[in-house]
Amino acid sequence: MKDESTIGADYLFDGDSCILEDVCITMTDGKIKHIGKGKRKAKIVLESAVILPGLVNAHTHFELSGLRAQEESADFVEWLYRMRLKIDKTSLEDLSRASREGIREAIRSGTTAVVEHTNTGASIEPITDSPVRSVIALEVVGYDSSQIEKKKEWILSNIKRIGKTEMRRIGLAPHSAYRASTELLRFSAELAKRNDLLISIHTSETLEEVEFFKKGTGRLPALLKQFGASLDSIKGNFKTPIEFLDSLGLVNNRSLLIHCNYPEKSDISLIKSRGAAVVYCPRSHSFFKHFTHPFEILLEHKIPVVFGTDSLASTPSLSILDELKFVKKNRPYISAQRLFSLATKTAAQLIFGKEFGILKENAPADFCAIKLPEKCRSDNVLETALSNESEVVLTAVSAKILFFYNSPYRSA
Ligand SMILES: [Zn+2]
C-alpha cells in the first residue's frame, strides 16, 4: 500500500457549509484520499477538535516581524515615517531571521498559505525554505529614475530566481498608489498582466491618502517629499486612490486591494465591476483607530473580502484565528461559518485556485485543527471555535504535519 496517513477528529468543516461528525481523513500523495466516519480508526486522533481547511493569511510582511509595535495604537502617517527609519537601520540578516520566526508563528496558528509582501527581499529565502503555500509579492516602491531602473531589475531578477512551483507563486506589490511613481505602477500592471501575476496593493488605507489623491492637500505630501517623491503627476487629480490605480490597469480580477478602509460609493461599484477582492486586516485597522471598516457593505455587494494580519508592527500576533475572534467579538451577528469560509475557501480559491480551500476527496490536504474548549453541539462547533480559549493544535500542508500540539494526541 502507498504511504497513507490518517487523522481523526470529532468534527470537520469542509470550508463551505458542511460539518461532519466523528471523522477520519485518509491522505496520500499530499491529497485527501477519503473522508469517512470513525475517528478511532485514525493513527492520530484529535479529541474535542474540529478540522478545517488551512487558514490563509492574505496579507502580511514577515520581514517586519522583529519590529514589533511598542505602542497600543498609532497615527498612520507618523508610524509610516518611523517604520521607514527602523527598516533602514535593520540589517538584512536580522530581517531574514525575523521572517523565519514570523513564518513559524504563522504555522503554529494554523496558517497553511500566505501572501507575503517583501520590500527588502529578506523574507524570500525564509519563505522558499518553508513548507507553507505562498505568494511572494515583490514590493514596488520608488520615485526617481535611478530608483525605478534598480527596482525593475530587482523585480525581474527575482521573478526569474524564485520561479513558479506548486508551492510558490510570485506576485507584484506596488506598495501603494503614493509610494511608487506612475511609471513603476504602469510597469507593474503590464508585467502582472503579461505573466498572470497576483497584484497586492495597499489602498484607500487612510483619510490622508484619499485627501491627497482628490485634492493634493493634507499631511501626506510632506511625508512623501521626505521619501523623495515627485508628486506632480498624482496630487489633486480628483480621483480616489482606487480610481487612480484603475486608470493604470491595477484593479482587476487578479488584484488584492489591501485595507480599503475608506472606499467611496463609486469605488465599491468599480471594485465589483473589475472583479477585485479586498483584504481586511482587522486588528491592524483597529491599531490605527480607523473608522468602522466597510466589511459588511463590501460583502453585501458580493465583493470577496478575505483576511490578513499585516505585520507585527501593527498587530499583536500573526494568527488569522485571532483576527477572526476579533471580528466576531466586534460583529457578533456575523456567523462563525461565514468568517471561517472567507478565511479558508474564499481566500484559498481566490489566490491559489479552485482546488484549494475545501476539504473533499482529491483536494490538496492543507488543513488545520482547532481544539474546542468545551463540549458543543454540531450546530455550534464553529461558534465555539471562535471562543476565547480555542486554539490551533495541528497544521498540515500537502498532508505533511507542520505543527502538532501534543495534549490532544492519542496514538493508536
Ligand atoms: Zn501591509
Image (spheres, rainbow, N blue to C red):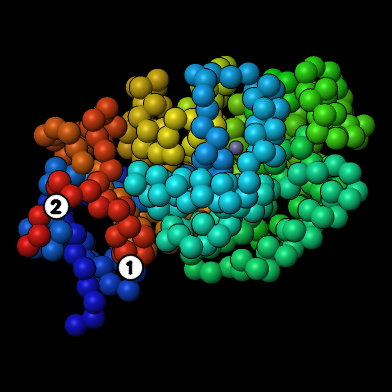
Circle 1: residue type: Lys
Q: Nearer the viewer, residue 357 or 79?
A: 79
Where on the image, by quarter, is ligand 1?
A: top right
Q: Residue at x 45, y 60 (%)?
A: 130
Q: Left or right: 323 with respect to 196? A: left
Q: Quadrant of the N terminus?
A: bottom left
Query: What is the number of the mark on residue 183?
Result: none
Helix, strand or loop at mark 1:
strand
Q: Left or right: 113 with respect to 176? A: left
Q: Residue furthest bottom?
A: 1
Image x and y of residue 147, in percent: 84, 48
Helix, strand or loop at mark 2:
loop
The residue singled out by tag 2 in the image is: 409
Circle 2: residue type: Tyr
Q: Left or right: 37 with respect to 107? A: left
Q: Quadrant of the C terminus?
A: bottom left
The residue singled out by tag 1 in the image is: 31
Q: Nearer the viewer, residue 379 or 227?
A: 227
Image x and y of residue 361, in percent: 29, 65
